[in-house]
Amino acid sequence: MGLNRRRFLRWGLGAAAATPFGAKLLAQNATPKPASPAEASASAVEHVGCLADTTLCIGCRKCEEACNRRNKLPRPEVPFTDRTVFRQERRPVDKAFTVVNEYAGAPSPDQAATKQTYAKVQCLHCLTPSCVSACIVGAMVKAPDGAVVYNPKICLGCRYCMVACPFQIPAFEYDVTLDPRIRKCEFCASFANGTGADPACAAACPTEALVFGKRAALLALAKDRIEKRPDRYVNRIYGENEVGGTSWLYLTGRTGTEIGLIDLPSSPPAKQTESIQHGIFKYGIIPITVFGALGAVMWFNQRKADTNAKSAGPDKDAKKDGAHE
Ligand code: SF4
Ligand code: SF4
Ligand code: SF4
């Protein structure tokens, strides 16, 4: 007999209630959702941010190294002093939350003697983050200070956030068997912890190409630099308006697309993601069904992973633990 709607709903509800993942999902659905990205963006005036001035960056990769240490990521196979990494354009991955890329040509018209331009890439901590609105369980959250942070404890591993991000930032731990996480820059989450410390990358930058502060103050600083040096800077601050604005801002002497900054509209794609996700949540029975099905699949996958890990012996677990030391 085919799987009719009633049976599917019953199976979904049963699975939702019976499996650990389903229970987690149902609990999440019953929990008040965090403020929507649109609501969060309303308080953007208090958000912190970082201004990256590509005309000052020398490609030393100290920011990459500092990020690696602060986040206790595995040491890379190629040392941070090795400039051969610049032979190809890189993106942040699960073991490197930020990377610096090199582009041929001077950083600005008045720096003709300099033959390369460098640009750092990481999560831009959007004011209206698509990753947050795409996450059905609230594992991605826009903190009041502006940092977009991740909670691995409630993440389902669905990777919707990866698909939703217009900057292609969230990375998945594909080589981790048990409980793989999404990994990305969390702005060092120092503000969320109340320490007030600068993000590691900004603190390590020897040329002050990275300046940390309140986003509003950084915008004023960037505009001041453009006004004082029109010969150096393009009259545009990348991140001021892109996808509704971002907490990381870029000041450049060249067109953004020449140095890896993706050309994006000012309207946030999060609004569309939000309406789709919120549409799904409009009638309670649908999420329960979807969650039940998802829960059953996740529970099955988890059991399979557990069985594989047991048959592989203790080395697998040791490898996983060691990977983030
Ligand atoms: S850049 Fe991507 S991962 Fe970062 S906050 Fe924006 S949508 Fe989320
Ligand atoms: S803010 Fe922290 S996590 Fe983000 S790139 Fe800088 S050092 Fe890495
Ligand atoms: S530490 Fe500063 S100068 Fe060095 S690569 Fe990073 S942003 Fe550029």
Image (cartoon, rainbow, N blue to C red):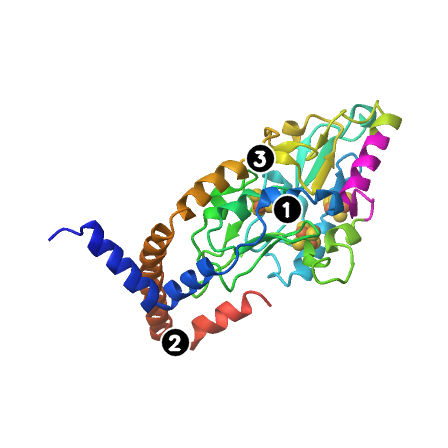
Closest to the camera, between mark 3 and mark 1, is: 1
283 in magenta: no
Q: Is mark 2 within 8 Å of ligand 2?
A: no
Quarter of the image where the C terminus is located: bottom right
Pointer 1 local density, CA inside 10 Å: few below 14, some 14–19, many at least 20: many
Q: Is residue 309 toward the left or the right of residue 216 in the image?
A: left
In the image, farthest residue toward the bottom: 314
**Whether label 3 touches label 1, CB < 8 Å:** no
State the SS at label 3: loop
User: Which amino acid lies under the numbered mark 1 shown in the image of this protein?
Assistant: Ala
Pointer 3 local density, CA inside 10 Å: few below 14, some 14–19, many at least 20: many
Viewer-nearest residue: 245 or 8: 8
**Whether label 2 touches label 1, CB < 8 Å:** no
Mark sitting on residue 278: none
Which image quadrant for residue 296?
bottom left
Q: Can residue 244 be seen in this view?
A: yes
215 in magenta: yes
- At 57% from the left and 47% from the top, the residue drawn is 36
| Marked residue nearer the N-terminal end (3 or 1) | 1
Residue 15 picture location, percent across and down: 30, 63
What residue span does the magenta drawing correspond to? 206-225
Viewer-nearest residue: 84 or 91: 91
* Mark-to-mark CA distance, 2 and 1: 46 Å
Residue that badge 2 annotates: 313
| Marked residue nearer the N-terminal end (2 or 3) | 3
Mark sitting on residue 268: 3
- At 86% from the left and 31% from the top, the residue drawn is 224
State the SS at label 2: loop
User: Which amino acid lies under the numbered mark 3 shown in the image of this protein?
Assistant: Pro
Viewer-nearest residue: 53 or 151: 151
Q: Is residue 85 toward the left or the right of residue 287 in the image?
A: right
